[in-house]
Image (cartoon, coloured by chain):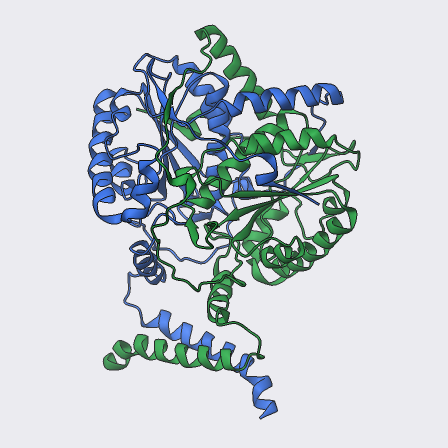
Chain colours: A green, B blue
């Protein structure tokens, strides 16, 4: 029995490999060698997909040509000049007032799921995206693509994809606990705002760059960088009186990427519907933590 | 044969479940199912730690008590009332002007490594942290802790830890390519700003919460949420004329967490030195991408 207990992990591993092999073989021709990765991702996904996991999109990543970081010379790799930097400085009183005002502005921000169909000036959206693009990024790689969709037909296609996957998420993948946590916020798989909002902003992270010679360029900490950029995007939207809800549509990445014709080095990180709030918009009556609940001074 | 081919996926699934069950059962008491995940994470770490990986801190995670998402009733799980939401609305012209002004403000932000030792009003820092705390988070879990260090001795301890690890990173872990990419920005392992800056903000992500009854509370998408919050933090700092540099000190997480006496469910995500720029501060002469390089309109 003790021997069996020692052997079981090894046995399990071998069985898993056999099973995995059979499973792959059983798939129709035309599936890629990455099927294994997908199956693995899928099984992990069924475990706890929403805890510190990327949105999965392992489709069509071309791995040929070496995964190692290759030394590549290109124009933007030259040593950069350094220039003096002296930004605006405010008197202490002004700083204090500005810090209060900005806190007050941002503290009014809420995730809003009821968005008005009223048109929003496109130039405002351009400026908001430009603002998001001022975020820092690992080694200044700027690994983000913001796809701004206003075409009604494309918005509807997006809705169909998201709702189909979200219904499966709610019914099968998420587990009672998550569904319950979201039920408090009255969140479900019907996403009317995807048709209604004048703009959908789909934020893609570029998991690597592509150099002019076709080689890969490493994008250090790309997910953190793009998420920081989204934080600045939210601030920019709030600053002009527009609302959104930060959503991370689970399992829709590959389909949405194909729909929007984005290359395989880009993966969907977030989807933000943007517009004015609907006249009858409501939000859950949430409170935020107090300062002593989020800050420790040493 | 056709029948077999149809059955194989189902068969594979059942086998996988059996195998998975055996595998879990075979593990020694006290170890959790996460051991496997940790081992996997560790081996991945040695591969390319800086690409879409968390800062690693797997030390002392207490995994006892079940890894599954348990249904937990607590005060904050009650169904929430929904309240009307009608934020300030600006005329189009005002929106446009505000979007330009905020872009202009944020576009002046740069990562600054030369920070003045001049004191900064603590109340400004409080407001900046409060502002960061307005970020959205998965299921409103607010999974962030901002440790604000002004004590000179603690700052120096932090510097010693970071510089020791960073030197190893530069000399051994990062590879020529990364060192080269950072050399352009004149970045190395000497971090004088860690002593000099009046404040160091260490941003921790709470990988899970802890309920009053001691059980774990799931923190959905905690790394993305905390990164978004950091984006808003950067905006708030820029708004008051303070500078910082967004750093992700590799491999220092566990030591810094212990130094700052943070619990094991918190992991260091970023370290931001904060202050006025030094009078002779310089920045690399980087350009940002144009709008058509980051935005696609459909």
Name the residue nearer the viewer: B37 or A178.
B37
Q: Residue B209: give x, y in percent of width and height.
A: 43, 43
Residue placed at 28% from the left, 49% from the top?
B175
Name the residue nearer the viewer: B130 or A285.
B130
Quick check: A99 above or below A54? Answer: above
Q: Residue B109: give x, y in percent of width and height.
A: 47, 24
| Residue B142 visible, this orientation | no
- Please identify the quadrant where the C terminus of chain B is shown: top right
Quick check: B214 above or below B122? Answer: below
Quick check: A54 above or below B255? Answer: below
Residue placed at 67% from the left, 36% from the top?
A112
Quick check: B128 above or below A179? Answer: above
Residue placed at 69% from the left, 55% from the top?
A163
- In the image as oriented, which residue stretches furthest toward the bottom? B1
Quarter location, residue A81:
top left
Horizontal side of residue B271 vs B14, given as left or right: left
Quarter location, residue B96:
top right
Quarter location, residue B35:
bottom left
- Please identify the quadrant where the N terminus of chain B is shown: bottom right
Horizontal side of residue B4 vs A243, given as left or right: left
Q: Residue B143: give x, y in percent of width and height.
A: 46, 39
Residue placed at 68% from the left, 28% from the top?
A124
Label tally: 0
| Residue B167 visible, this orientation | yes
Q: Residue A189: give x, y in percent of width and height.
A: 68, 53
């Amino acid at each position: 029995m003790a021997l069996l207990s020692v052997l079981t992990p090894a046995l399990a591993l071998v069985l898993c490999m056999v099973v995995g092999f059979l499973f792959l073989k059983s798939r129709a021709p035309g599936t890629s060698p990455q099927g294994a990765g997908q199956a693995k991702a899928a099984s992990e996904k069924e475990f706890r997909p929403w805890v510190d996991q990327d949105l999965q999109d392992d489709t069509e990543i071309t791995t040929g040509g070496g995964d190692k970081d290759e030394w590549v010379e290109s124009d933007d790799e030259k040593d950069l000049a350094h220039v003096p930097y002296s930004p605006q400085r405010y008197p202490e009183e002004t700083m204090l007032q500005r810090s209060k005002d900005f806190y007050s502005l941002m503290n009014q921000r809420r995730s809003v799921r009821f968005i008005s169909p009223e048109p929003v000036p496109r130039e405002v959206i351009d400026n908001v995206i430009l603002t998001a693009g001022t975020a820092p990024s690992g080694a200044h790689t700027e690994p983000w693509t913001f796809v701004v969709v206003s075409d009604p037909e494309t918005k509807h296609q997006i809705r169909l994809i998201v709702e189909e996957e979200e219904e499966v998420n709610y019914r099968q993948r998420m587990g009672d606990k998550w569904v319950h946590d979201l039920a408090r916020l009255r969140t479900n798989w019907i996403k009317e705002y995807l048709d209604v909002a004048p703009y959908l902003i789909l934020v893609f992270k570029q998991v690597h760059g592509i150099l002019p010679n076709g080689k890969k360029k490493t994008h250090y900490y790309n997910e953190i960088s793009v998420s920081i950029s989204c934080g600045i995007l939210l601030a920019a939207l709030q600053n002009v009186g527009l609302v959104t809800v930060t959503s991370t549509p689970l399992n829709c990445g590959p389909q949405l990427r194909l729909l929007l014709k984005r290359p395989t080095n880009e993966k969907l990180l977030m989807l933000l519907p943007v517009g004015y709030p609907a006249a009858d918009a409501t939000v859950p009556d949430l409170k935020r933590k107090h300062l002593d609940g989020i800050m420790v001074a040493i």
